Image: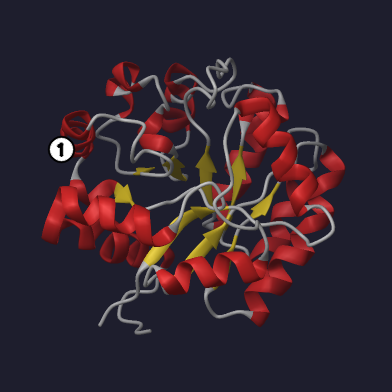
Amino acid sequence: MTLKFDFHAHIYTEEIADKLIGKMEAVYGVKRRHHATVDGVLASAANGGIDRVVILSIANRPEHIVYNDWYAKLGREYEAIIPFGSIHIENDPSELDRFPELGLKGFKIQPNAQRFYPDDPRMSPIYERAAKLGLIVVFHAGDEEGGVKGVFSQPKHYLDVIQGFPELTIVLAHFGGYQAWDDVGPLLGFENVYFDTAYLPGKIDDDLFVGLAGSIGYDRILFGTDFPFRDHKVEREYVERLFEEDARKFISDNPARLLGLEGERP
């Protein structure tokens, strides 16, 4: 039996989880399915047969990198949690030097929340450092929910990053451009780029979902949920219904290879 992964989930400390998620619900019209806490994600993952969950954090402001230590601590305490850290365009790239020792596998950039374009030249030292350290960068790509335009995160803003940093491992969330899938074509076919399925079920036509997956290539796709706004069991069953045996590549084979966990068992 192989490990099963969710490559896209969010949790926060007990003190701030409800406040942060409540704000997102108000702004984007989304609705949480679970509490955005350690207990919440572990329960949902277990119910959905998911063994490992990649936890993504975002430094909306430079000082938010203080939470990198908290996420790292979760990774040490819970086998099921694979923690990613965060960094902001105004932070010194040397913050990334701590990541390997902390057990942080990479970081997420949410351009709309952080208010900068991913291809801003000021990000180059961060990308260079990440590539050198072998860190994975997950990007929010496309629009936001609730009809909110993703001004900073359209697919066109990623091409220069992909081409300019071929040694940087990149994951583009939401199949490379939430609600902007017609513009994803130029981002396909690069060896350093993967795409996740987070928040897609029910928001994209089944035929378009399958068609995009074929264009991306099944070996470049990672199963993601966008917990706490999605449920692990529901999302997994949806993907397995559409892709049958090939869903194993998204849920197990590809994330295990990317994270260096091939051969590990639950």
Give the quarter of the image for residue 22. top right
Placement of 79 over or under 130, stated as above or below? below
Q: Amino acid at mark 1?
A: Gly
Give the quarter of the image for residue 102. bottom right
Q: Going 54% across and 51% down the picture, which residue do you hit?
A: 33
Q: Position of residue 64 (x, y in %)?
A: 82, 46
Q: Going 53% across and 72% down the picture, which residue do you hit?
A: 43
Residue 42 appears in view: yes
Element assignment for label 1: helix
Q: Position of residue 156 (x, y in %)?
A: 44, 17
Residue at far left of view: 245
Left or right, 81 with reference to 162: right
Q: Position of residue 144 (x, y in %)?
A: 54, 25
The N terminus is located in which quarter? bottom left
Count up the numbered dots: 1
Q: Going 35% across and 82% down the picture, which residue do you hit?
A: 264
- How many residues crowd around disc 1 within 10 Å: few (fewer than 14), some, or many (20 or more)? few
Placement of 187 over or under 96, stated as above or below? above
Residue 101 appears in view: no
Q: Position of residue 128 (x, y in %)?
A: 59, 42
Residue that label 1 marks: 214
